[in-house]
Amino acid sequence: MDRLKSVFDEFVSRHGIGVALFISLTVLVWVLVLIALPQVAMLDYSFRHNLSPQDIGGPQDVYTLSNYGFFLFRDGSGTNTLDMGVLGKTILASVLVTIIDVIVCYPIAFILAHSATGVAARLMILGLIVPFWVNEILRAFAFRVIFGATGLINGVGMSLGFWDVPIDFIRANVALYSGLTYTYILLMVFPIYNAVEALDRNQIEAAQDMGASWWRVHWRIVLPVAKPGIASGATMVFMLTAGALAAPQILGGPSNLWFTQLVYQWFSDAGNWQRGSAYAAILLVTCLGFVLLMMKVFKVNIGAIGR
Amino acid sequence: MSASTLRGQTFSVGYSLLFFGFLFGPLIIMTITAFNSSSFPRISPWECFTTEWFGVLVNDRRLMGGLVNSIIIGAGVVALSVPVGLAGALALAEIGPKLRSALYTVLITPILIPGVVLGISTIVFWGHIGRQLGFGYDSVFFNGMFLTIAGQVTFISAYAMLIFSARLQRFDPTLTEAALDLGATPGQAFRKIMLPFLRPAILSAAFLTLLASFENYNTTVFTILAQSTFTTALASKVRYGIDPSLSALAVIIIAVTLIGAMIQEAHTRRREAIVTGRASRSRLYGNPIGRFVAHPATIGLLLIALAAVAIWRGSLHDATVCKQEVIDEKRANQQRFLEEQQKRMKQNAPAPQPAQPGAPQGTKNPSPFGGAFGNVAPQSPDAAPPGPPPAQNPSPFGGAFQGLSPPKQ
Amino acid sequence: MTKDVALDHVTIRFGSHTAVDNALLTIQGGEFFSFLGPSGCGKTTLLRCISGFIEPTEGRVLIGGNDMRRVGPNKRPTALIFQNLALFPLMSVAENIAFPLEVRGVGRKERRRRADELLDLIALPGVGDKKVYELSGGQRQRVAIARALAVEPDILLLDEPLSALDLKLRHHMRTELRSIQKRVGLTFIYITHDQGEALTMSDRVAVMSAGVVQQIDVPEVIYDRPRTAFVASFVGETNAISGKVASQSGGDVVVDTPIGMLPGRASGGRSYAPGDIVTLFIRPEQLAVGEAANAPSISCTVVKEEFEGSVRNLFLEDKGIPLRLSRVNSGSEGAPLVPGQVVKASYNPEKAWALPATPEA
């Protein structure tokens, strides 16, 4: 408390009482009312029964584990392999998308930072940003246009005689994975770019001068510098992919659910907010746990995220 | 050495082309489909050049209603998340390193938390507050607009904060000290030194937060409750049947984006030239005409005028004749196909009818006519049938040439 | 118009680190006063304390006799010129200069008039509408001074303002600063690690080391009669020969060194007991080749001679102790010396100082 008081006094002496109050109160409201309390409320809700409005606060309104129990055992009839499978598949697929994004974005970030100059570099940055000003839904829609049963690839493939029956890219999740990879590319390129840009070009040249092959230059010189950027980008891409809802709804096959879609179904279709909250909490904890685990494995700090 | 550099450059150029091909390919394809009269957004077969999908788009009630909601929500989100993000960034910039990393972790989490979780926690929390205070379902705590703003501000503020933090890192704190030393009060120093320094960041934060608010789906789809925003309306439209009016929307967004980007580029170049003092020596900025032509406002006006002309010309375009020809052609093809089939059936009457690949069959797969007629009422969900197989395709050239013919007037 | 600045036993601590230790001094009104010391010696901390950004942990800062405790930087009669000048990049030159008037609510016209006046004072008329980045380094320097003067301060504080300039300009600005100070007649408190700046411009200099003020005096005395080993070695070049005191009579001391019994002076009226460990400091220009009457001499071997334009530096050595000797390049110093040659080096014992060896020296 004393620390906070001295921080506040520091603000007052630097910017005056008005600005100090603005900063402290705003941050307080943001952290408490917008970030922390809603999560607590959701967690609380996830331990409650789905009751009709008049029963809320009544004798039936007690804490329960049934919503989490449902995720594990369905209605007590054996393990709920279906929902757990969806969660596992969501995590695995998100990892896959993240890895693809790292592989796709690392070269372009490096080229942008160390090969492109002047106008070319500016155009490239503009070219990276412009597609992401287009609505996410429309980006997913574009992939449906390309991969749909009567879409561009099937149209071209069949008219050239490569195959006769339309290939169901949607069911095979090709469309979904491509769409997700595409959607979060920007979030991967810029952190890596920021990290790699700090690298002194002379270091690369010195290494080449000493006879290092290009992959060794990247492995020993560039990658260590890029690591915090990759970590930051990978964390964001993973979290956003695992939490994506629009792309799976639009591009996902009918039998291939994303975990967020289960959450959505509990809310919209089943009207069971409590169970939906429990599923949301499961998603949040799993994803954060996974990210923290990966950070531990790769020895990176959360402070690197968003930089 | 030079050989490897050359190889490196070839790789760089090649990879960049592939990468940007991947980035822009979908957008270009989508753009082209907006002008094809086919009721399913596609490039081939090309039927007729048309601008009717723009009309369909504008007449979509639900989408336009959502647009109004989105604008209101966007204004609210910008008005809140820019100051909130600014406060966060200022707090982070000036507290001790230990407290800073803790606060940073807390403030950055809303970006990492899945949007659906944010949406759910927002409605659960405010609903709880509303019930505790004894408000009914018609109160603000159950109002989709309010909840959406609250939910979006939670994480969009973090975006604004990142922008401000990046700018603040380049702020020289001695400027504030100098102002104080010269007799300014702390408040004056903030208003006259810090805020002007942050002005560009405020503008870009406002733009980015507006965009993020407008685009958001994952959180909004929960918090908006029974209402809809532009993006949620768009999503349900895409989920329940797609038609090229969505491509038309993409065309509009891409055009606006490009115009904005070009004005921005002209602006940065101009400022750079002035700041570095190259302006007076450069050929472009050195003479008055060049200066006028290269001014961002001139370029902006020019582009907007071009867009207006395109809209006007487009609105005059009429593809009815062309479409009729396509329909006739399809009908003729169909007729011929049926006749052939009947002939074949007569030849081996006892044999069960073979499933012709791609032939119209059953109710689930309406005839290509349906597809063509679908153009007339493209708004009905699931109207878009799977297209006819390539064997029955009308010649794509026919359509293309029709499309190229000048607008009939 | 001008006011004294008194540091009354000022101590400043950051946690366990003592940045300024018990500074006690008075700066006269109208004086050009310099704090000289290596980086990290606490001189900038002291300056920020005088301008009000830091409160002393112990002791008081008095300006014109008034205790400045809890008086913010914007309320003190001081103006600080920052090391990086801290000119406001988004404002024009005139707006920068008139900023102190703007925050005091002076009208636009009056502000402009005053800014133009100050621009005339610093000999930069007509640049008021330029942006700061359009000016050269030296011009920015002067604008920063004009802006500080617009406050109409009693005391101008300067934090190494010349360190970013190139050598020529730095030398020019020394004269410039001194003449501005003479013209406006304010107290200037100047911080620098460059002894040349401190010695040429100042009325008095305070040499600081590790938070402690070592010596306060006029430049000549600082150079000629250093009172601590640190001052002797930090200000100017010097030869340091350590040894033990053999005898002392009055201010004259004889030091028993590995290269013989060498006479010198005890600085500041110190008296030593025989056997005290001291260091004898002899400036290179006080050493001369050859023997002279009544002058002690050291016989040593030539290691090498370096030519440095106005002077020749002769590197000598005796029993592992290096000695450096500077001769003015007047053309009358005779034949060049050859490495390995044995020569006599004599010095004036009145300008050799025996000082107690301190850990940091």
Image (cartoon, coloured by chain):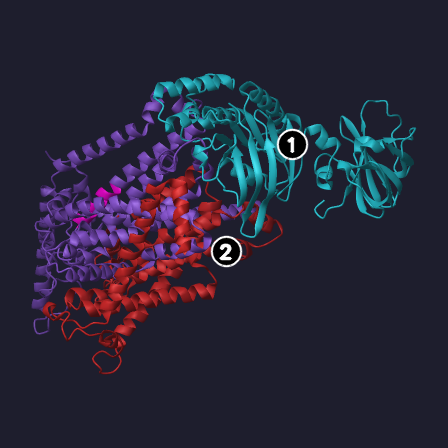
Identify the hue of chain B: purple
Q: Position of residue B394 (x, y in %)?
A: 16, 51
Q: Name the residue tied to disc 1.
A: C205
Residue B246 is a magenta residue: yes
Report whether A2 appears left or right of B55. Answer: right
Q: Position of residue B62 (x, y in %)?
A: 11, 50
Q: Position of residue B329 (x, y in %)?
A: 11, 50
Q: Chain of mark 2?
A: A
Q: What residue is drawn where x is 53% and y is 56%?
A: A215
**The disc labelled 1 sits on which kind of residue?**
Val
Region in magenta: B244-255
Report whether A255 appears left or right of A242. Answer: left
- Give the chain ID for the red colour: A
Instruction: Tell which tag, 2 or 1, sits nearer the viewer.
Output: 1
Depicted A243 relative to depicted B46: above or below = below
Q: Disc 2 and disc 1: Cα gap in Å? A: 53 Å
What predominant SS class does the magenta segment belong to? helix
- Give the chain ID for the cyan colour: C
**The disc labelled 2 sits on which kind of residue?**
Leu
> Could you say whether the residue bearing mark 1 is in a helix, strand or loop?
strand
Q: What residue is drawn where x is 81% and y is 47%?
A: C276
Q: Name the residue tied to disc 2.
A: A223
Q: Are marks 2 and 1 on the same chain?
A: no
